[in-house]
Amino acid sequence: MKKMLVMAPLLALVVWGAGRAAAADKNKCGCYKDDAGLCFCDKKAKCGCPGDCEPKGCEQARDKRIQKEIEAETKKAAQADRKHTRGESKAAPTTESTPTSSPRKLTSAQAKELVRLLDLYFAGNSDARTRSAEDVRKDLLSR
């Protein structure tokens, strides 16, 4: 009986020490791994330790959040593309060889760019120099 009275407090001390050691090994999520590598978490454990021991469902929640972000960015890019495409169609209506009622004048920068583009075109198509501008235009539009 004396042995039992001496052993009980010692056993309680060992169990208390083991509990403290496990508590000291917990990560910031409130989880720890045992000697076998199994993960144990407190009831109040939270996600936030990717790649480490964390509560069940954290990886799935993280994947779901990332998927939503990807979908949101894809949707935003599609809307921007639609706005960009819609803006281009309003800015430059495509009319085939019908002169506008009030032609606008080219700025000097636009005229220089046109000359540069024509030089590039004529360098690749030497026979185009002998054709009219309207013929060259039709040829370019038919591509």
Image (cartoon, rainbow, N blue to C red):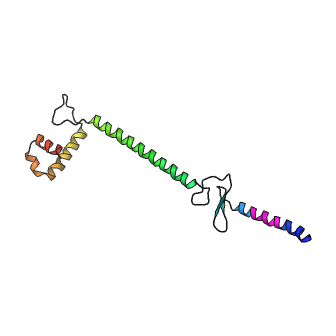
Among all residues in the image, which is located at the extreme front? Answer: 1
Please provide percent x and percent y for residue 96.
17, 37
Residue in the image at 57% along x and 57% along y: 50
Residue in the image at 20% along x and 35% along y: 95
Residue in the image at 20% along x and 43% along y: 114
Among all residues in the image, which is located at the extreme bottom? Answer: 3
Please provide percent x and percent y for residue 108.
23, 38
Residue in the image at 15% along x and 36% along y: 97
The one nearer the camera, 130 or 98, is 98
The quadrant where residue 93 appears: top left
Instruction: Considering the whole magenta stretch, tell me its main secondary structure.
Output: helix
User: The N terminus appears in which quarter of the rendering?
Assistant: bottom right
Magenta stretch contains residue 3: no
Range of residues picked out in magenta? 11-19
The one nearer the camera, 103 or 49, is 49
The quadrant where residue 94 appears: top left
Please provide percent x and percent y for residue 47.
61, 53
Among all residues in the image, which is located at the extreme top? Answer: 101
Q: Is residue 89 left or right of residue 47?
A: left
Q: Is residue 105 left or right of residue 126?
A: right
Q: Is residue 41 left or right of residue 72?
A: right
Among all residues in the image, which is located at the extreme left? Answer: 130
31 lies above or below 14: above
Count of marks overlaid on the render: 0
Magenta stretch contains residue 16: yes
